[in-house]
Image (cartoon, rainbow, N blue to C red):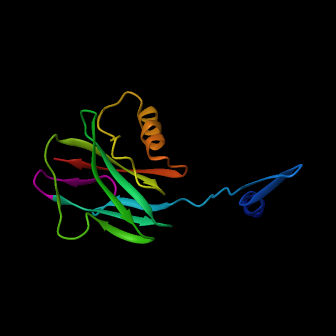
């Protein structure tokens, strides 16, 4: 069965269709861009107000990553944006630090990967009843054709 999936992926990975002089080509990429995304203590770890947190992010290919925090009360805000190369990264880079502040409880963090820079006109901030609709607006504004969203979480006490 696994061999069937490998063969199917190989067949669908690149395709050319020719219709009376018009040639259409497309490539279906089944490889995820984000291979790993988690807090430095692991998914679901406990942190305390005033502590610093870092995230490990591994990318299969270079691109733009926006970190989005969803607090326990539903408030959503964009923490940071980066252009990162292929490989494993510790976020935030350099001397910059993420120091944790209330509210206490479950904090979800999403990494949104795009191959093009996100638009400065649209940010993922507010309280959303429909995250997918807001994400579509964000992606349309950037003109991103390819994207991926990965989520992790931690608890703040």
- Vertical arrangement, residue 62 with respect to residue 149, above or below: below
Quadrant of the snapshot with the N terminus: bottom right
Q: Residue at x 38, y 56 (%)?
A: 65
Q: Which residues are magenta?
A: 42-51
Specify the farthest residue to the left.
50
Q: Any magenta on residue 79?
A: no
Most distant residue in the top direction: 129
Between residue 88 and residue 5, name the one nearer to us.
Answer: 88
Task: State the image coordinates of residue 77 (x, y, percent, origin top left).
Answer: 27, 42
What secondary structure is the magenta-colored segment mainly? loop
| Residue at image location 54% in from the left, 59% down from the top | 32
Q: Position of residue 41 (x, y in %)?
A: 27, 62
Residue 140 lies, in percent from the top left, at 48, 41
In the image, 52: left or right of 141?
A: left
Residue at 14% over, 43% down: 102
- Does residue 54 lie above or below 136 as drawn? below
**In this orientation, which residue lies closer to the viewer: 124 or 39?**
124
Horizontal arrangement in the rendering, residue 119 relative to residue 24 (left or right): left
Between 96 and 105, the one nearer to me in the picture: 96
Residue 149, above or below 70:
below
């Amino acid at each position: 069965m696994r061999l069937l999936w490998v063969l199917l992926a190989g067949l669908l990975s690149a395709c050319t269709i020719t219709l009376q002089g018009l040639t259409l080509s497309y490539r279906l990429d089944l490889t995820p861009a984000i291979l790993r995304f988690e807090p430095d203590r692991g998914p679901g770890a406990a942190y305390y107000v005033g502590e610093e947190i870092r995230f490990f992010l591994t990318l299969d290919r270079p691109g733009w990553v926006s970190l989005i925090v969803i607090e326990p009360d539903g408030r959503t805000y964009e923490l940071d944006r980066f252009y990162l190369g292929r490989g494993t990264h510790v976020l935030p880079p350099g001397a910059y630090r993420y120091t944790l502040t209330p509210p206490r409880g479950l904090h979800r963090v999403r990494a949104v990967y795009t191959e093009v820079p996100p638009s400065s006109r649209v940010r993922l901030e507010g309280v959303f009843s429909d995250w997918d609709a807001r994400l579509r607006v964000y992606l349309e504004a950037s003109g991103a054709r390819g994207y991926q969203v990965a989520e992790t979480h931690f608890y703040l006490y």
